[in-house]
Amino acid sequence: MKDLYLDCEWHRTGEIFLLGYAHSVKHFDQLYDHRLSEYMVDEIFNQVTGHVYIYGPDIKMIEKHFRLSLRKNFMCVNLLTAFRREYPGMYNYKLSNLEEYFKIQRKTGVYKSDINKLMIDWNNEAHRGQVLHYNKEDVVNMIRVKRKICGEVGLTRKKLEKYRLK
């Protein structure tokens, strides 16, 4: 099974400017600028033989931006919803809070508290690398948090399917 983990960054207008994706912690890539196209997004999804995992509204944003029907064609699971229901007791289910709880280190946490800075830095070539690294940490740490929670509560792939986005 080849799963896919996604995280997008977008403007307030809903326009996606960065899509990070991974099949595992070690197999990560990003689409932006000329590579961020419907063709390239299709290529990513053509490799999926398992589940598609996101943390929040990213699938809806991708569908809207690229006019795709991903939820109909793939097992898309919102881990935010799954974790809220299967891992009760946290005061907050933001990915950054779960990273902190599980002691998963992050180098680019500044954008978690200031989304406007993310936009400003994306448009500044000298700081764009920080935004790219932030997005990478979002995707890779989502995988790490999923492993931790699923391991602790025995949350299997099959059980996650009840959180399929419709």
Image: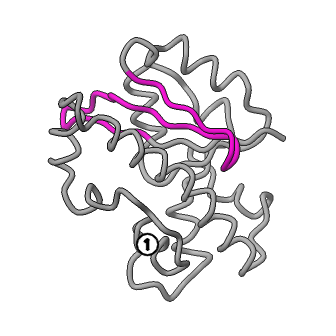
Query: What residue appears at the point 63 percent right and 50 percent down from the top-left corner?
Result: 164
Q: Is residue 133 above or below residue 42?
A: below
Residue 50 position within the rendered picture, expressed as x and y whole percent measured from the top left: 77, 40
**Residue 74, relative to residue 32: is it above or below?**
below
Q: How many marks?
A: 1
Amino acid identity at mark 1: Tyr
Name the side, left or right, on which 82 lies relative to 75: left
Q: Which residue carries the number 1 mark?
A: 93
The structure residue drawn at horizontal position 47% and vertical position 52%, both measured from the top left corner, is 138
Residue name at image x 78 percent, y 76 percent: 154
- Say left or right for 11 vs 59: left
Per the rendered image, the range of residues in magenta is 8-32
139 on left or right of 51: left
> Which SS class for mark 1?
loop
Query: Could you tell me residue 115's position as x and y percent?
Result: 21, 51
The part of the image, by quadrant, that contains residue 119 is top left
